[in-house]
Image (spheres, helix red, strand yellow):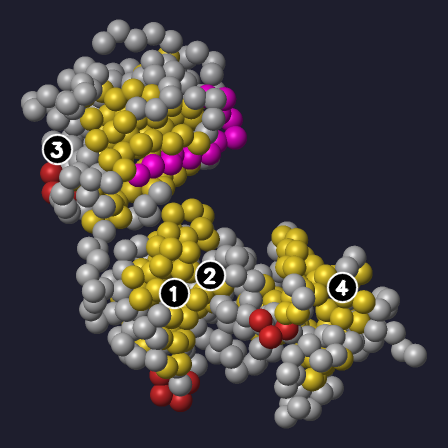
Amino acid sequence: MQKATKISTAVFCGLIPAFLYSYATGPDPRYTGAPGDSTCATAGCHTGTALNGGGGSVQLASSAGASYTPGQQQTLTITITDSNARVYGFEASARPDSDSSKSQAGDFTAGTQQQVICENGRSKAASGCAADSPVQFIEHNRPFGTNVIDVTWTAPPSDVGPVTIYVAANAANGNGNETGDHIYATKLQLTPAVPVTSNNPVIQDGGVSSLAGYQPSAGAAPGTWLQISGSNLATTTRTWDPATDFNGNNAPISLDGVSVTIGGKDAYVKSVSPVQVTVQVPDGIPIGDGVPLVLTNAQEQTSPYVLHTSDLAPALMAPAAFKVSGTQYVSALFASSDPSNPVYAAPTGIADGVNTTPAMPGDIIILSGIGFGTVLPETSAGVMATQATALTNPVTILFGDTPAIVQYAGLALNDVGMYQFIVQVPNIGAGDWPITLQVGGLTVTSNVFITTGQPQ
């Protein structure tokens, strides 16, 4: 196959990474880093930077998370990050783990600026590749100007066990020669989706959100709380009992046989029921797209539910009982109120059985939240806070455009992963004021309000 105008892709040379010299019209087959692919022995190699050593990276995510359903199409997203790159190229291959060097898994469909070739170097026919050259390679047929490339892949028609997608990508500087380009490689393993039966646990579409009473779309971050909704999630209904379910100050990772992993890490299970499970996200999870959440019980495990995770997911408590005429009010407890008869800063008479009154400038109120990140002294996810702490990332709380004085911002004592903010109401006029949070470089407009008044 004659190819002009040079661009690069990468290959693993046995256990030793090397650079493969390739072309703008697409690389030759078997240079993806997959087992059995050729070494650089017969190709000119790029020089100067080790594989995955250019200061950037390539990431691979699937629209179906970490699983595949036989015969179903999914999108594989390749994201190449490199501050020096001007154009981008790639080559990818899908292999069954049972025969990762010689067999093909599923079928690729070429998109714009893409082509699918067989291992014999010929273009894939409508019927696929020849029986003696079954492995397919999808690649660019001219360089991309974007660093995000979507690839269409159809899973094998039957369960072939785990499948791994391999990709090698070139972040090229566009100077027309083999020097200065950066080569990155990665892989993504997909497992067959669990067939649904009447007893299998199932997470419903859109079934993972922030804990009830907080902003549902706040997101997933280490230490925050998530609510999982679905069917057959558990056979019992209960909440943890710190006296019997904790190991000292450490929360349980399983409750009545129900456990949850997020990015392969054990979450902390606070409550279970057949239709809802509440968990705290563990520390150390991957940050970004395509992070799988899997619930396991005595019957089976769910198909992976794909999350986008971030370092922070701040949200303030604002229960449904504090919503009236389309306006959601924050749970702002007056610090001076009697615990047996709490009073909240909200319009008078907002809800039956709840004592509310507007807050005055100078009043001290207590706000509660989740997802605000790390604290000092360090208190890990899943551990009950037994001493006062301070947020690592300072927080600013605005009433409208006016900052409040935050007297305390840390974990609530004798609780797990719940934050408490002791706040002095600023000198503002009477009315409903939106609460805005600034923490860790984020500005979060939470769409919750507090009611203030003025002394008569």
Which residue is drawn at the image coordinates 12% and 33% (left, top)? 103
96, 213: nearer the viewer: 213
- Please, what is the three-letter code of the amino acid marked with disc 3? Ser
Is the residue marked by circle 4 packed among few (<14), some (14-19), or many (20+) residues within 10 Å?
many
**Which residues fall within the magenta stretch?**
74-87
- Tell me the CA gap for discs 3 and 2: 40 Å
> Picture coordinates of residue 302 (x, y %)?
27, 60
- Please, what is the three-letter code of the amino acid marked with disc 2? Ser
> What residue is pinned by disc 2?
209
Which residue is drawn at the image coordinates 16% and 27% (left, top)? 135
- Sequence-earlier tag: 4 or 1: 1
- Sequence-earlier tag: 1 or 3: 3
**Contact (Cβ within 8 Å) of mark 4 with mark 1:** no
> What residue is pinned by disc 1?
229
- Sequence-earlier tag: 3 or 4: 3
> Picture coordinates of residue 62 (x, y %)?
34, 42
- Tell me the CA gap for discs 2 and 4: 26 Å
- Sequence-earlier tag: 2 or 1: 2
- Sequence-earlier tag: 3 or 2: 3
Which residue is drawn at the image coordinates 80% and 60% (left, top)? 402
Can you say whether 374 is above or below 61 in the image? below
Q: In the figure, residue 4 lies in which quadrant? A: top left
Q: For this view, does 200 lie left or right of residue 60?
A: left
Query: For residue 75: magenta?
Result: yes
253, 201: nearer the viewer: 201
Is the residue marked by circle 3 packed among few (<14), some (14-19), or many (20+) residues within 10 Å?
some
- Tell me the CA gap for discs 1 and 3: 39 Å
> Picture coordinates of residue 67 (x, y %)?
26, 48
- Tell me the CA gap for discs 4 and 1: 32 Å
Q: For this view, does 130 lie left or right of residue 281?
A: left
